[in-house]
Image (spheres, rainbow, N blue to C red):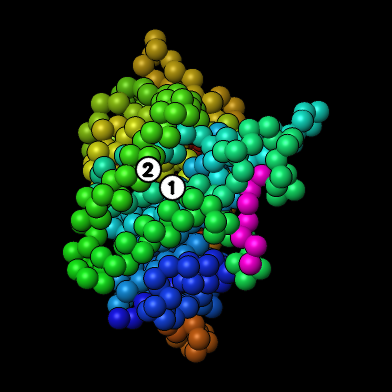
Amino acid sequence: MNFRVWYSTESLADFIIENTSLQNHHPVKKKLFESDAKSSKDFHKLPDHIKKIVYLDAPDLIVELNAEPIFTIEVSSEAGTGHNAFQRFARLAASVENDVPAFYVYPDAVIVKRTNTNEKWDKINPLIFKALDYMMTIYRIPAFLFYFASDFSVQKDAKLSKFKQSKGLVYEKNIKYAGCPDLNNSETASLMKIIDILIERVCALGVINARVKLLSLREFMDRRSFMISEFTAKQGNMDLSPLSATKKIPTQYLLNYLNKYENGTYKIGELLRSRNETVVYQVDAAFRGDPYPGCLAAIDYLVCREGKSFEERKYNLVLLWGKLLVDENNKTICIGDGKSSINDFIKDVRASSSKNLLDKSFDELSNYEIPRYYMQVRYGSMYSKVKHIRVYSYFSDCILFPDGALWRDA
């Protein structure tokens, strides 16, 4: 059996390999490159089945058996309030949408100190559990969160934490595993146990057959139940961020707003018209990436998605840069002056064109560029655009700015 571990950080690869049954299979470690936009000399060398998982955003680790990915891992040590817990959600979605289990390691709470305040625990936004659970319901593939080790469970007073220097987080002492959570923590042990069960199953049944049965395993059901109970115990509700930044409107209001782009030769297509209502995610900020791409992906699963494709949505999903103003009298919308322009989006798209080789003649290509050129012939600029442009255009049925709009027709 040929196991390979694709990593962005080698210490995490060693941590997972050497503390699970992976060590018995002597996996080969391989460097994982995020995108053609960031690693133009190396990304095209990734196998096609790995490229498919990183099409939105690259996880920290991908483990495969005989060229079939079996799970991905994403690790964060950030405070999880507000939008932050969702910052990397698109990475999890990219994995699960390809039928690959995703494991998210994230702190229950992190000690923060803000101006003129004492240290306090910044707790995780419990809505992340609901988003992961809805994604599991649609795909029937595990998407589990495990807490990054901390002493929050035993010391609620942040000022008295033994690990205040590391924001309350407990890191593994072995320097070889720098940045990884403490192995003695129960949540870390739970992650390793789940990985071991998964490896045992894929070895016994094969990757494809094992995948469809994982959520029926008792240990996997128990983990899912734990996540559901955490949502409830932490007073989770559907009014938390980022859903607090959304508003549902009649789709006709959106169409009335967009009709200024219609004329005698063009009418907006059937996709937007096929749904009676539209969910608008308002971002009143300068145009940028994190944390908004992950939040947009999470909103899709929290309130819009009913199936495995964006076409299978109950509601349209619109990303609006600015403030939404609903004009009930004229049954339309307006966009208040915001901090972003459609030209900010166009600028980032144009910047990505510098990675494009398709306008070159063969004689202009260096030898190392030939396989990359061939990749771009097949995929176009799919992997050459920056992450936030990829995610926004993948999840949004429509993107609105005060001075312009983009939308799908189908």
Q: Nearer the viewer, residue 316 or 294?
A: 294
SS for callout 1: strand
Report the magenta residues as a range: 167-174
Tell me if residue 51 comes above or below residue 214 in the rendering. Answer: below
Residue furthest to the right in view is 116
Q: Main secondary structure of the magenta part?
A: loop
Tell me if residue 34 comes above or below residue 316 in the rendering. Answer: below
Q: What label sits on residue 145 in the rendered view? A: 1
Q: Determine the residue positioned at 19% across, 68% down.
A: 205
- Spatial CA span between label 1 and label 2: 8 Å
Closer to the eye: label 1 or 2: 1
Q: Which residue does the numbered mark 2 point to in the structure image? A: 132
Dots 1 and 2: beta carbons under 8 Å?
Answer: yes
SS for callout 2: helix
Looking at the figure, which quarter contains the C terminus? Answer: top left
Looking at the figure, which quarter contains the N terminus? Answer: bottom left
Amino acid at circle 1: Leu
